[in-house]
Image (cartoon, grey):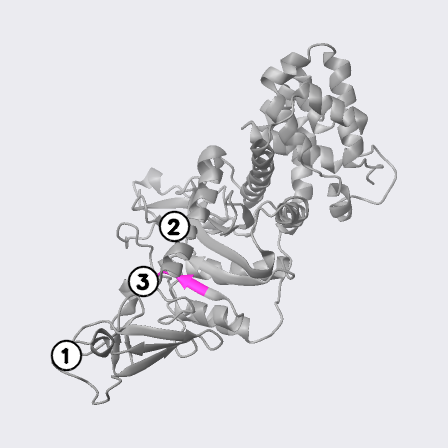
Amino acid sequence: MISTVRSHHDYLQFVTQTLHQHYGDSIHFLQDYFAETILWTTSMDLSLTAFLMKDRYSAKTQGRKPHDPANLLRSILLMTKLHMSVDQWVYAMRITPVYSILSGFPSGKTPGVGTFYDFFRQLWLTDSPHLTKRIKRNLRKPRKKGKKNQKQEPKNPKITEKLVARALRSHKIHYTSKAHDQLQRLFQTLFVFPSAAKGLLGDTESFSVIGDGTPVVTGGRAYGKFLCDCRKKGNWKCSCDRQFSDLDADYGWDSYREKYYYGRTLYMFSSADSPYNLPVYPRLLKASRHDSVSWICGYQELRHWYPNWKIGEAILDSAHDALPIYTMLEHDDVSAIIDLNLRRSGKLVSGDMKIGTDGVPVCSIGRKMINWGMNRKTHRNKWRCPAKVGKWECPHPCSTSEYGRTFYTSTKDNPRLFPRIRRDSEEWRQRYALRTGVERCIKRQKIDYKLEASKGRSSRHWTIRVYLIAMCQHADAWLGEAKKEQLPSIDQWFDTHRAA
């Protein structure tokens, strides 16, 4: 049973009093070395952690009382910020009292390594750290390779159509409980919603979401552990089952580096209108899963977790260029800003009219027709003959009318070729340029916070690590907002919280 927890105000009082008692007149030492760390850590109000995790603790009063979950969460976030392992962090708290005080622990009463690993198990809603129960398997690297910056096609070409048909079959979102639900609940309540309240995620009444996947290399061995004695008999290429330490990892294609990797795919949903490229829903999936499949599944989960947000537009790259995705987004009244995948396009035609890759009809002599207005209610565009508009003589007129040939395109008829925002417009170019925000969000995970520096072996390890980094990204944004104004000195910070 969780003992009585303190409010954020009480936590701040504890920090100010304990730091002052411990360091006394050496405040300049904190100003020189720990000023931003103190401001970063104390900006996070984690007082609701115990309430959100009450189901993960026993109701019995016997035995030793557990640590306040808010202190443990705050401590591992600070550990993630400083790029330390659990062993290094426990040692650092014992030799650097400011870290234990900022975490919320009295000096000399810091938890041990086992306490943190127990807390990780509380954050994961299944008994096993893996999502699959397979212990032995025969996994081979695929032979077919793609080209530079070209992701491989899904193994099942009809998978997106089937998934979307299943999603649209019911008006309700069917969501089954997942192992990462506790982490997502903490993430959205303690970080995403406060960031939205600060205006750092754009307009949640018309939310612009970006999605993209990236390879995450695992610490497990791709070839596994041999369980047979075939090598002793001279057979070095046997097909016997092997034992793998990372049961959920498999092979995926890294289109940027043009090679196969062994691990997972991190599929990130982030805000397009966030000045800090903040994440709202990270998902770790199989490395072999195509981005279009990851989007369909993750998009439904995103709507489940944020039911009060109205998604206004989805900005995606050409890997998501599949008609079922457009159909699903149009069904939900979401504007699709997706780049065309020319490998799938073939001949772009609508009726007897050719369509350019930018969605503009092309007349019989190969000239682009002129847009003559749009009905924004029905998303229907009118196009006119370029000769009649430009007042020049066409060598092969396709209409005897003085007004010239007209052609209409409608999003309802073909949402892929004729999206709500025309691909030839400046508005399209400006909105699609925001897609790089998710790449910067992923860069923060993989480069700034060194996601792959860890050599974990389980889905629990990697999922917790991804969520901790995502929480740190929001805390970094809050500090960035504070830096727009002059940050208070440590003396001023002490005086403010003493007065409170």
Count of marks overlaid on the render? 3
Q: Which residues are magenta?
A: 336-341
Distance CA(mark 3)–CA(mark 1):
35 Å
Q: Residues within 10 Å of mark 1 (few under 14, many from 20)?
A: few
Mark 1 falls on what kind of element? loop
User: Could you say where residue 446 lies in the image, as x and y percent from the top left?
Assistant: 45, 38
Q: Nearer the viewer, mark 1 or mark 2?
A: 1
The residue nearer to you, when weighing 149 against 488, is 488
Q: Nearer the viewer, mark 2 or mark 3?
A: 3
Relative to 446, is 310 on the left or the right? right
Q: Quadrant of the N terminus?
A: top right
Question: Circle 1 sits on which residue?
Answer: 393
Q: Residues within 10 Å of mark 2 (few under 14, many from 20)?
A: many
Earlier sequence position, callout 1 versus callout 2:
2
Earlier sequence position, callout 3 versus callout 1:
3
Distance CA(mark 2)–CA(mark 3):
20 Å
Q: Locate residue 160: give its quadrant.
A: bottom left
Question: Circle 3 sits on which residue?
Answer: 341
Q: Residue at x 21, y 87 (%)?
A: 399
User: Could you say where residue 148 lies in the image, as x and y percent from the top left?
Assistant: 27, 49
Marker disc for residue 252: 2
Task: Kindly tell me whether residue 108 is visible in this rendering.
Answer: no
Q: Residue at x 50, y 47 (%)?
A: 247
Marker disc for residue 98: none
Q: Locate residue 440: give its quadrant.
A: top left
The residue nearer to you, when weighing 78 against 135, is 78
Mark 2 falls on what kind of element? strand
